[in-house]
Amino acid sequence: MSAEVTAAPVQVDRGTVLAYGLPGLVTAVPMVPVFTLLPTFYAETVGLGLALTGAMLLVGRLLDLVSDPLVGVLADRWAGGRGLATLVLVGAVLAGPSLVLLLSPPVGLSPGLGAAWLLGFSALLYLGWTLVQIPYLAWGAQLSQDYHQRTRLTASREGWTLAGILLSASLPAVLGFLRLDEGQQLAALGWFAVALGLPAFYLLLRRVPRPRPMARAGSGWEGITANRLFLRLLGSWFANGLANGIPAVLFPLYCAYVLTVDDQTRNLLLALYFGSAVAGIPLWLALSRRLSRHHAWLLAMGITCPAFAVAALLGPGDVAAFALICLVTGLCLGADLALPPAIQADVADWDRLRFRRNRTAALFALWGMATKLALALAAGLSLPALGALGLEGEAPPALAVGALALTYALVPCILKLVAMALMHGLPLTRARQAAVAARLRRRDLAATQD
C-alpha cells in the first residue's frame, strides 16, 4: 500500500476516479442475490418459511447496527495515513468467505440449523461490509471538497455499483440458460464477487491517495443532533431506502404470484431495471451540473412515484407493462444511488465547518445504519405479514396476492413522498457548498502550517 497522504487539495485524475470507483462494482455484485433473491431462496428452497426468514434477516441487521457507530468513530480517529485502508482490507477479508458460505448453504438443513446458518453468516457478512463501506465512503468524501470532483468520485463509485448490480442481475439469467438451478446460481455469484474483489481492492489500496490532513477538532457523537441538515437528509434517505427495500425484497414474490412469470423472465426484468439505471447516470450527472443535487434527486423521486404505482394494477401476463415500469423507474434509480451520498458528503463538510468536529465517517456510519435498518424492516415486516396472510405454496388466497401487489407498489410511493417532503427546500445549494469548501480549505491549510 504505497499511496501517499496528501497535504494539498487533491487533483482527482481519471486513474484515481477509476481506482476509487471499482470497489463499488465488487460490493454491488452481492446486492441482488443477498437483498432480492436470498430471502425467497431461504424461505422456499431451504424451507425456513417467510416468517422465520424475515425474522432472521431482521435480527442479523439489528445486530449489525451495533457495529456501525463503532466503526464510524474508529474510522474518524484513523482518518489519516493507513487507517481507512486498513479497515477496508480487514472488512474485505471477512466479507468474502462469509458471502460464499451464506450463498452456499448445505443441502438438507433443518429449519433450526438453516436459521442459524442464515443468521450467523449474514451477521458476519454485514460486519465485513460495514468495515469496508464506512471507511470507503469517508475516504471518497475527504479526498476532495471540490463540488464537481466530488460528483465525479461519487458518480464513479455509484456507476460501478450499478454496473455490479446489473452484472449480478444478469448473471442468473445467463446461468439459467446453462441449466444451473437457483442454489448453484447464488453460489456462483458469491465466488464471482470474491474473484472480482482481489484486483479491485488492490487498485484502491495502491492507487488512491489517502485523505489529506484536516484541522484538528473534536470527533465522535456529542452534539450530532444539532446538525439539523444531517438529520433532515438522514430521514429522507431512510424513507427512500425503505421505499426501495420493500420492492427489492418482494420482487421475486411479485413476479411469481402477481405476474405469474418464471424465474428466467424475472431475471431478465431485473437486468432491464438495473441496465436502465446505468444508462440513466449521465442524465442525472448533467442535471446535477445545472441544478443543485437535491433538486435533481427530487425530480427523480417525483417521476418514480406515478410510474411505480401502476404496478398495483397489473396482473398475470402483464409483462410488457411491467417492463416499461422497470425501464422508467430504473432510469430514476441512478439518481437515487449517485446523488444522495454526494449530498451527504456536502453535509459532512458543513458539519465540520460549523461544529469543528472531524466525524465524517461517524456521519456515514449513521447513514449506513439508516440503510441497513430500512432493509431490515423491509424484510422483517413485509415477509412475516404476507406469510401470515397465506402467501406461500402454489395457490395462495386472492387476499394475500392483492396485499402483495399493494405492498409492493403503493407503500413505496407513500414513503417516497415522505422523503421528498424532507428534501424540499434543503438550503445547502451548490453555491453554498462551494463557500463551505473554500473556508475549510483555508482552515486546513492554516492548521498544517502551524
Image (cartoon, rainbow, N blue to C red):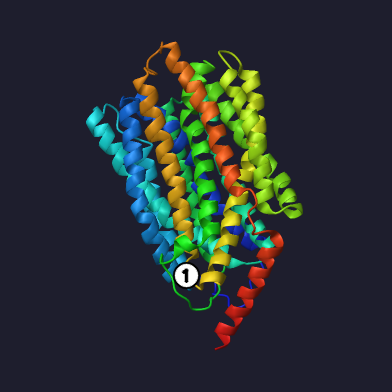
Residue 128 in view here = yes
Which part of the image, by quadrant, shows the C terminus?
A: bottom right
- Vertical order, 136 against 262 (above or below): below
Q: Residue at x 43, y 70 (%)?
A: 219
For numbered disc 1, what is the local secondary structure?
Answer: loop
Q: Nearer the viewer, residue 267 or 51?
A: 51
- Vertical order, 71 against 190 (above or below): below
Q: Residue at x 44, y 14 (%)?
A: 399
- Which quadrant of the structure image shows residue 268? top right
At which x and y percent is residue 261?
Answer: 53, 17
At which x and y percent is residue 428?
Answer: 64, 59
Q: Nearer the viewer, residue 219 or 184?
A: 219
Q: Which residue is mark 1?
A: 79
Q: How many marks?
A: 1
Q: Nearer the viewer, residue 255 or 385?
A: 385
Q: Residues within 10 Å of mark 1 (few under 14, many from 20)?
A: many
Q: Amino acid at mark 1?
A: Ala
Q: Residue furthest bottom?
A: 450
